[in-house]
Amino acid sequence: MVPARGHPDGIRRGRPQDGCTRRPGGPEDQVQDDQVRGTTVSRDGRPDAAGVDAEQLWLRPAEPRRGRRPSFSREAITGAAVALADAEGLDAVTMRRVAAQVGAGVMSLYSYAPDKETLLELMVDHVSGELVIKEPPSGDWRADLRAVAHLQRAHMLRHPWLPAALSTRRVPGPNTLAFLEHALAVLRPTGLDGAARLEVFAQLTAFVAGHVGHEIAQRAAVRSPGRVAAEARYLAAVAADGHHPELAEALAAPGRPLTPDATFARFLGRLIDGVGTD
Amino acid sequence: MVPARGHPDGIRRGRPQDGCTRRPGGPEDQVQDDQVRGTTVSRDGRPDAAGVDAEQLWLRPAEPRRGRRPSFSREAITGAAVALADAEGLDAVTMRRVAAQVGAGVMSLYSYAPDKETLLELMVDHVSGELVIKEPPSGDWRADLRAVAHLQRAHMLRHPWLPAALSTRRVPGPNTLAFLEHALAVLRPTGLDGAARLEVFAQLTAFVAGHVGHEIAQRAAVRSPGRVAAEARYLAAVAADGHHPELAEALAAPGRPLTPDATFARFLGRLIDGVGTD
DNA sequence: CTTAATTCCGTACGGTGTACGAGAATAGAG
DNA sequence: CTCTATTCTCGTACACCGTACGGAATTAAG
C-alpha cells in the first residue's frame, strides 16, 4: 500500500499533542515539517501552495477504534453538500447549511473534512461515481472519446456547479480515477504514450468544463430578459459606431440558431480531429 | 449612439426617488421593470439571471454636472484593484482593501461601481487594454490565430487572476471589443460566417483561460513540495493496487519533461487544425 | 437665498470559514 | 471496577466579507 507512518490524517485527532507524538528537537525535524497550514490557491492564481493533501484525504485508514463513535459519516455529509449544490448552487454550500442538513453542529463537520476546500473535493468525487462505464472501449477511439466527452457533458449539466468546482486544481479520488482509467484505455489505440494520453484527457475535461460552464451561464442569462436585451442594445450600439465593422457583420449574420448541442459537437469534433494529427 | 432614456446608470444617483423620474402608473410601466435586483450567477450555475447591466456599465454618460465633484475615478479604483490582484491574488481584492489603496472610504467605491461584480468586470477590461495589436492580419489565418492565442496566454500569465475572473460570463468592454475586432478580422480568411467566427474566438479564449488556469495551479503547487510529494505517493499507491493498469503505465512513462510551453503549443495546434476542417 | 443632485463615508447588519476548548462517549490498562 | 487516553460533538467567538442605510458635505440650478 503506502508507508503510512503514524496517523496520517488531516482531521483533528487528539488535542494536547496533535497527532503523531513529536517533541521539538527530536529527529526528522526537517524541512518537510508540513505542519504549516498549506495556504490554498483558492481560485485566483497567486497565493502559493496547493490545496489538499491527497494522501491524507484518500488513503485514510479506518483503524481508529478508540474514543467516541462517530455520529455521522463522510458519505452523509458529502451527500448533503451535493444535494444542496444541486438544488441551490455552489454558494448555498456553507458549513452551516450542510451541518443543518445532516443534523449536526457546524463544527462537527471538521471531524470529517479538515476544511471546506476538502469538502468540495469530496463532493466532486462523490458525483463522479455516477460516471458509470457500460462497456469496454470498442476499437474506434474517436467514437469512444466522443462518448466520454458527451458523458462528461451530461454529468456536468446534471450538476451545474461542477465546472466551477473543477476550475481549481483537484486531486483525483477513487471515482474520478475509475473514469480516468477508462478514458486512458479508450486512448490506447491512438498510439500516444501514457503521459500524452493523460494530457489529452485533462485537456478534454477542461474543454468540456469550460464549454458547459458557458452553456449554463447562457441558459441562466435567458431567465432575466431585461439584462439580455440591455446587452443586445449595447452591442448594437457598439456595432453602429463605425469602429467595429467585424462585430457589426457578425451581429448582422443571418442568425441560424446555434443550439448548444450542435456547438458542443462541432468543437468536440475539432478537438478530436486535432488529437489525431500528431 | 443609443436611446439612453433618462439617466441610465446603475450607480446611486440621487436618494429620495432613485434616478429616472417615474411615477407608479405612468406609461411604459411594462414587464421590463428592471428595478428588480438581478440575482447574479456568482460562479456556480444555479441561481438564475445574469450579473451586470452592459448598457448601464459601458454606455455611461458623462453628463451629470451637478452635485459634489468626484474625488476619485473609475480608472484609479480599477487600477488599484488590478494592482492588488496582481500582487496578492483575487482574494485580496476586497472593497475595504481597494478603498484603502486609493485612500477612500469603503462605501465611496459604490459611487463608481454598483457592486463588486461590476468592479471585477472593470478590472478585466482594464487589463485588456494591454492587448495591443501591432499589425493587421497577414493572410495566414492559422499563424495569426496562433499569435492571438499566445498573446492571450502571455497576458493571462501576467495577470494570473484572469482565468478565474473570466470563468463567469462577462460582457465585453471597449478594450475587449477592440481585441475581439482584431480576432474576427484574423478569422476572415477561414470563410466562416460572422457567428461562427465569434464562436471560434469565444472557444479559443475559453481554451486559453482553461489551460493557463491549470498552468498556474501547477506552477503554484510546485512551491509546496510536501503536497506534491504526497500526491505522487498517493498516485503511486493507486497505480500499485492492480486495479489501475492504465494509470500505472502512464505514470511509468519515460518522463519527458512536458514543458508548459510545448504542451500549450501542441493543444493549440490541435484546436486550430480542427477549425480548418469544417 | 432655496432646492435638488451628487459624492463621501461611518455605522451597522447578516453572512462567512474556522480556532478554541469544554464536555461527552468509548476503549484499553490497571 | 477505576483511571486514562483518545475520539467525536458542538457552543462560543473572532476576524472578515459585501453592502444597505442615511447624515453631512459639496456643487449647480432655479
Image (tube, coloured by chain):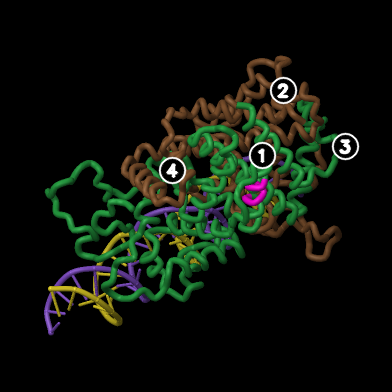
Chain colours: A brown, B green, C purple, D yellow
Specify whether A94 is left or right of A120.
left
Residue hosting label 3: B254
Could you classify mark 1 by the number of other residues whose Cα lies within 10 Å: few (under 14), some (14-19), or many (20 or more)?
some
Whether labels 2 and 4 share one chain: yes
Residue hosting label 2: A186
A167 and B64: which one is in front?
B64
- The picture quadrant where one finds residue B246 is top right
Measure how far apart labels 4 and 3 are at the Cα level. Answer: 51 Å
Which residue shows up at 67% across the image and 48% down it? Answer: B150
Amino acid bearing label 1:
Arg
Residue furthest toward the front? B139
Measure how far apart labels 4 and 1 are at the Cα level. Answer: 23 Å
Which residue shows up at 45% across the image and 59% down it? Answer: B119
| Local SS, label 3 | loop
Residue hosting label 4: A248
Whether labels 2 and 3 share one chain: no
Chain letter of the residue beneath label 4 in the structure image: A
A67 and A224: which one is in front?
A224
Q: Are marks 4 and 1 in contact (CB under 8 Å)?
A: no
Amino acid bearing label 3:
Pro
